[in-house]
């Protein structure tokens, strides 16, 4: 498994340049920085890389951390926007569904290849496997940090950790006390009011209660640049109530509870569109997460997680051309999960983790599945990691997950990595593995229809044949350094990924060869498509993706902080690919820059710059040209220290509007908003 594709001779030029750059960084490390006393006393530990707390220098995969200071300085008010700060990540919004997050392209309107978690609990929706970012039952202010694994990581998290892992880690109630009130208001009908209360009971339970209401017009009326047809609009409203508590019930035992309910309403559509007029989409999402941590000794602990999440979407309208029939877009989804994990040190040089989990999911949708009953499935997994400090400098990490999935059967995802410490402050990492993504309920059982009684009047996407799980072979070489004396952290990574059985859709004309209609198909007299078409899921041709990422985090007291990242990507699609835009779906470069500066009299200023080259979003999306965005934030804190009182003004996209997701149709508009936070 140590054979890495990145070392093969016939490697594309961008990747060879990345390797040369990597070697250059190693050779340029100053001798002064190599001294043994130059290490970060406050170097952050990461939890998501291997499920065990460890230094980024020891992590078997590349991990980015978005910390509290970055979250605040960015001025972002929505969680998905924060991922612009991660090397190689793309973020977009569109008015017909949730925002989209992608790593290195190959993405459409449903970000089903990224595993998203809140405190280790999976939040991807069962129907499509995507994430409803606007309906997540947490707020930006609830987040302590976000850890992002920049690549496939099935060895630790099983199927569907296919393109990366995003773990949103919330702030513990132990870290806060008192009350806080935050109000934000700005252009585009943006308003946001949030209240938080923290306390400690007589029997030692730290708790937090929060409630908030947010409203914004994300997309206003405009016309398609080519057809001059009005495009869709979107206005969203969210009401969130959340409660969390933690208690140290003994010297060795801790219990954590988090539950929340989010009520959302999105007004979407176009009032001049006869097929999909302006309508409301009401969402209710809720979750319950209980965890128990038992410390067995200084190097061993046992954790148990129990969680439940559900989502209900109610959307529909009346068709405005004869026959005037109601359209039902309702969906229901649910997941229950139980996971047990044990970590221990077997010997001074050996550390291990072993765990098991079971999950049950269900979905119901007449529109997407053409079924009046719920589809259900159960899966189980066994995962483990074994770490061996072979020498004082060399660490080997072996991990794997074997999962029995309700659709794909038994899948094994292995990983082997080696970390070599160049000094106390820098290390080289080589890693290789295999990961899978199982088809979602929709991909495996799609029958997207409009029904009138028992008659199918329109058909969208269907699954004709059995589809196979996607597979990726991934390899990387990385360099990580944290030099405390000069306040500098570096992260450089070159990667090569080879995909097979990539799932996509193909269109076909109904009644032609290999394109049968669904049962009881009697189309509307004036069909939406002439001749009527439908789409089907297929395992497409093989793809390769390679490139490099670089990130820098530099801070100096009295000077400020600079966080910079850039990525170069190249995609090669083999003959027979279902979409000719695969190779164009990744921009040649993606970059971000966040500057933070503190001034006298408790003023703080920050600026964020985000850029990606020309690219295509697949399927529902289209071309987006070279895009640059500049955000500015100016804030002043006041009151007694620790009160968190602050007034801020934020200007987003001060360099003007830019195309979003589909160049002809959608625009991201600049927004200026004011924020006031009070604590007591």
Image (tube, rainbow, N blue to C red):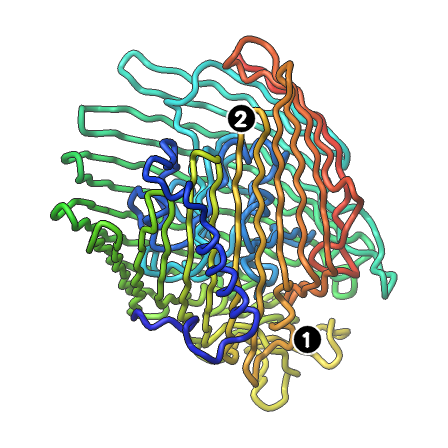
Pick out the residue farthest to the right: 228
Up-down: is 84 above or below 248?
below
Q: Residues within 10 Å of mark 2 (few under 14, many from 20)?
A: few
Find disc 1 in the rendering and name its residue: 523
Picture coordinates of residue 182, whole percent (x, y):
60, 22
Whether residue 127 is visible: no
Residue 467 image point, x, y percent:
44, 76
- The residue at the point 59 percent across, 84 percent down is 515
Dot 2 corresponds to which residue? 557
View extreme (bottom): residue: 513
Quarter that holds the N terminus: bottom left
Do we see residue 297 in this rendering? yes
The local crowd at label 1, few if under 14, some if 14 to 19, many if 20 or more residues have their Cα within 10 Å, is some
Query: For numbered disc 1, what is the local secondary structure?
Result: loop
Q: Is residue 630 left or right of residue 159?
A: right
> Secondary structure under badge 2?
loop
Q: Which labelled disc corresponds to residue 677?
A: none
Relative to 598, does residue 31 appear above or below in the rendering? Answer: below
Residue 143: x and y in percent read 48, 34
């Amino acid at each position: 498994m140590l054979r890495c594709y990145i070392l093969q001779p016939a490697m594309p030029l961008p990747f060879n340049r990345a390797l040369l750059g990597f070697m250059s960084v190693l050779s340029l490390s100053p001798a002064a920085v190599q001294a043994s006393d130059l290490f970060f006393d406050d170097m952050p530990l990461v939890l998501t890389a291997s499920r065990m707390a460890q230094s980024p220098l020891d992590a078997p995969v590349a991990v980015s951390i978005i910390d509290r200071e970055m979250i605040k300085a960015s001025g972002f008010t929505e969680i998905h926007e924060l991922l612009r700060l991660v090397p190689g990540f793309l973020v977009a919004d569109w008015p017909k569904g949730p925002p989209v997050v992608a790593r290195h392209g190959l993405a459409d309107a449903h970000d089903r290849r990224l595993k998203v978690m809140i405190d280790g609990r999976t939040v991807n929706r069962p129907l499509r496997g995507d994430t409803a970012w606007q309906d997540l039952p947490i707020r930006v202010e609830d987040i302590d940090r976000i850890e992002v694994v920049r690549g496939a990581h099935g060895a630790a998290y099983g199927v569907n950790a296919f393109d990366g892992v995003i773990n949103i880690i919330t702030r513990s109630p132990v870290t806060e006390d008192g009350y806080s009130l935050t109000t934000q208001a700005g252009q585009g009908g943006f308003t946001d009011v949030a209240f938080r209360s923290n306390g400690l009971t007589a029997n030692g339970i730290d708790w937090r209660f929060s409630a908030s209401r947010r409203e914004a017009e994300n997309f206003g009326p405009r016309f398609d640049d080519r057809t001059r047809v009005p495009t869709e609009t979107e206005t969203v409203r969210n009401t969130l109530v959340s409660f969390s508590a933690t208690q140290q019930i003994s010297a060795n035992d801790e219990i954590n509870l988090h539950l929340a309910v989010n009520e959302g309403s999105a007004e979407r559509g176009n009032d001049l569109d006869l097929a999909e007029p302006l309508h409301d989409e009401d969402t209710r999402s809720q979750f319950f997460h209980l965890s128990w941590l038992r410390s067995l000794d200084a190097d061993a602990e046992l954790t148990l997680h129990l969680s439940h999440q559900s989502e209900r979407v109610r959307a529909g309208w009346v068709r405005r051309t004869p026959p005037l029939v109601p359209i039902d877009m309702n969906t229901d989804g649910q997941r229950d999960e139980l996971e047990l994990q044990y970590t221990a040190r077997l010997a001074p040089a050996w550390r291990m983790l072993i765990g098991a989990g079971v999950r049950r999911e269900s979905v119901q949708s007449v529109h997407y599945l053409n079924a009046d009953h719920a589809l259900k499935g159960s899966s189980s997994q066994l995962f483990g990691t074994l770490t061996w400090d072979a020498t004082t400098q060399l660490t080997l990490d072996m991990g794997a997950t074997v999962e029995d999935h309700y659709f794909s059967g038994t899948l094994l995802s292995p990983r082997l990595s080696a970390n070599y410490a160049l000094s106390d402050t820098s290390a080289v990492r080589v890693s290789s593995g295999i990961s899978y993504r199982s088809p979602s309920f929709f991909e495996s059982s799609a029958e997207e229809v409009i029904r009138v009684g028992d008659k199918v009047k329109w058909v969208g996407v269907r699954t004709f044949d059995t589809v196979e799980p996607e597979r990726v072979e991934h390899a990387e070489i990385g360099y990580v350094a944290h030099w405390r004396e000069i306040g500098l952290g570096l992260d450089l990574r070159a990667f090569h990924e080879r995909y097979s059985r990539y799932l996509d859709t193909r269109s076909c004309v109904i009644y032609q060869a290999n394109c049968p209609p669904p049962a009881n198909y009697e189309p509307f007299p004036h069909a939406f498509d002439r001749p009527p078409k439908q789409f089907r899921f297929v395992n497409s041709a093989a793809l390769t993706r390679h490139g490099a990422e670089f990130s820098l985090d530099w801070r100096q007291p009295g000077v400020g902080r600079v966080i910079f990242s850039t990525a170069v990507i190249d995609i090669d699609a083999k003959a027979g690919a279902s979409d000719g835009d695969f190779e164009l779906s990744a921009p040649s470069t993606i970059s971000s820059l966040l500057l933070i500066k503190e001034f006298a009299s408790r003023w703080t200023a920050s600026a964020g710059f985000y850029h990606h080259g020309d690219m295509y979003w697949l399927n529902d999306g289209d071309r987006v040209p070279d895009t640059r965005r500049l955000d500015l934030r100016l804030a002043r804190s006041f009151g007694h220290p620790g009160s968190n009182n602050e007034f801020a003004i934020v200007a987003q996209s001060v360099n003007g509007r830019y195309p979003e997701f589909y160049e002809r149709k959608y625009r991201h508009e600049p927004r200026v908003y004011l924020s006031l936070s009070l604590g007591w």
